[in-house]
Image (cartoon, rainbow, N blue to C red):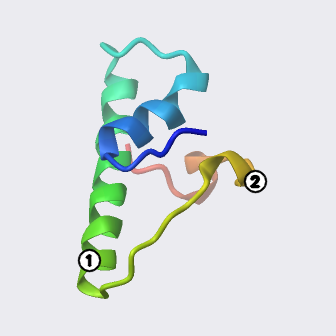
Amino acid sequence: MDKLDRPREIIEFCLKPLNLSKTTEEYKEAYRRLEHVIKTYQVMAIRQKAPVAIDFSNMRTITINEAAHGDDS
């Protein structure tokens, strides 16, 4: 697995299996949310002076059902 350290690379890796067109509103919203989470996490890691490396290839897959948790759309 190649090292992914830029938000764009991480997001594209995560969204690739969904096979969404990059021009859809759903893709753009998912991208926006993931970018916010990743950048916030990076800022917090820098503030804590705690470099973090995560091997995404070994992470367990989870299913997110926003409707079950209060979809905000």
Does residue 46 appear left or right of residue 72 in this picture? left
The quadrant in which the N terminus is found is: top right
Residue 46 numbered tag: 1
Q: Secondary structure at mark 1?
A: helix
Amino acid type, callout 2: Arg
Q: Which residue is mark 2?
A: 60
Mark 1 Cα-neighbour bin, 10 Å: few <14, some 14–19, many ≥20: few
> Residue 58: percent from the left, percent from the top?
72, 52
Q: Answer with the quarter of the image where residue 48 lies.
A: bottom left
Does residue 70 appear left or right of residue 11 in this picture? right
**Residue closest to the eye, 29 or 45:** 45
> Residue 21: percent from the left, percent from the top?
41, 11
Q: Residue at x 50, y 64 (%)?
A: 53
Q: Residue at x 48, y 16 (%)?
A: 20
Q: Residue at x 27, y 59 (%)?
A: 39
* Image height of 43 relative to 36, above or below: below
Q: CA–CA distance between discs 2 and 1?
A: 26 Å
